[in-house]
Image: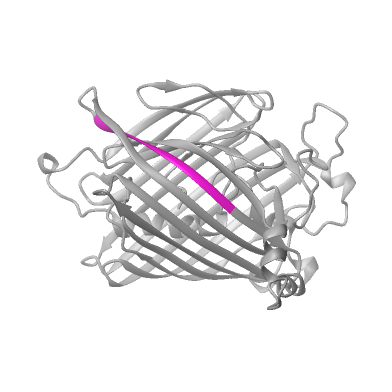
Amino acid sequence: MRCVGVVAVGILCLLAATPVALGFDEMAAEEDISDLLAAPPPVAEELKQRRWAVLPQVGYGPETSAVGGVKFTDRDLAGLGITLDLDGTYALNRQQSYQLSVGSPHLMSDKFLALFRVRYYLDPEQEFFGLGNNDVGPDEVSTQLYEQTDGELVLGWRPWNRVAVNASVGLRHVHIGRGDRDDGTPFTVDAFPRLPGIAGGLVNPIAVSLVWNSRDDVVRPTRGWRAIVKVSHTDRALLSDFEFTRYLVDVGYLYPFRGGRHVIAVRLNGGFIDGPRRDVPFWELERLGGDDTLRGYFPRRFLGSQRVLGNLEYRARLFEFPFRDLWQVRIDGAVFGEAGRVFTSSSNLKNEFALNRDLIQRVAQDLKYSYGGGVRIALSEALVARIDVGFSDEEKGLVYLAFGQAF
């Protein structure tokens, strides 16, 4: 059984681990902005719960060997309403990830916000399963060294308290190499030498986005909407090695009952990337599989130029307790089901959803499904660790650790 992740909370959870999934890279900044919009304003220290927390990350896996790291979040740095997030892990087999994010929604009397993110990620044994909604798995077709360094600056205007209109500029450099392997699996650079982006490269997305968050909490929301709409473009005229445009829509709703102790969460997500085939590197394609998409499949299991995804999750409050006068620890349980697929062309997408009598049967057969359950460990108003176990027709138990709610 492969696992993704690592964790502890005062109680230490030791898990087998594989490289951390990157999730939806293209909307990570907008998810952070959504959290900024829902964060409570700065208040006097004696009137608030503790808004910072630190968690050690410890794990072990056959691909990573021992893994160690730390997660730190402060949602009211120095009493200024600034959110600071630091996350770093390192494995003995060289898998590593480091991330810094700092943002504030309280600029110019709360009418503007700013967010800065920077990250480094290395996996010398990343798996590649080919393109499209294929049936290649659970065994990969090739493996590769994947190294990514990226940064992003976002400035936003808040016309209403829970709405932000944003402009951002980013820079991302990716290197693809031969890496490490334990068997005869070919390296991607040898097996697919003509794959767009096989040599890595530089992209510089410039984006505009709209973020709306009406939820009642950041760490443990029980009601309300979250919506993200984003358009980004990377252009050779601006020093990029590629040229394409990405469109993204993500909408989620939380419905509480029994006083908020139980929550039904629903999410719909779609992504579309447009550009000449040779100008869209395979590592920028829409993806499914991992800790916040199809949790019963390996990270980046499905790659395509279009993506559709639906998530359904039931969350229930279990119990809570104080931890050493530092944090109020709240434990929730969850069960989930997910369905989605990727497409390799616009005609493929149109044919799939063509209005005819075979529509329902065709879509039901072609979608990929996963299901599972997990726990959520929330520390006061600071952060939440999410441990999920996912199942699919390819795998019978993938364990993920991530921070923040899935959607």
Q: Tell whether position 332 is magenta.
A: yes
Depth check: give the residue in front, 406 or 113. Answer: 406
Q: Is 276 situated above or below 388?
A: below
Percent coordinates x, y for residue 407 in the rendering? 45, 53
When asked about the image quadrant of residue 77, the answer is top left
**Going by the image, does 123 lie left or right of 56?**
right
Q: Is residue 306 left or right of residue 10?
A: right
**Which residues, given as a range, are shown in magenta?**
327-338
The residue positioned 64% from the left and 62% from the top of the image is 307
Task: Tell me: residue 138, above or below residue 276.
Answer: above
Question: Which quadrant would residue 187 be assigned to in this image?
Answer: top right
Q: Is residue 104 visible?
A: no
Which one is nearer the viewer's eye here, 277 or 219?
219
Display colour scheme: one colour
Q: Is residue 220 above or below residue 167?
A: above
Which residue is situated farthest in the front direction here?
A: 357
Nearer to us in this view, 218 or 118: 218
Residue 118 percent across, percent down from the top left: 50, 49
**Magenta span contains residue 6:** no
Residue 380, position as x, y percentages in the image: 26, 38
Left or right side of 206 for 36: left
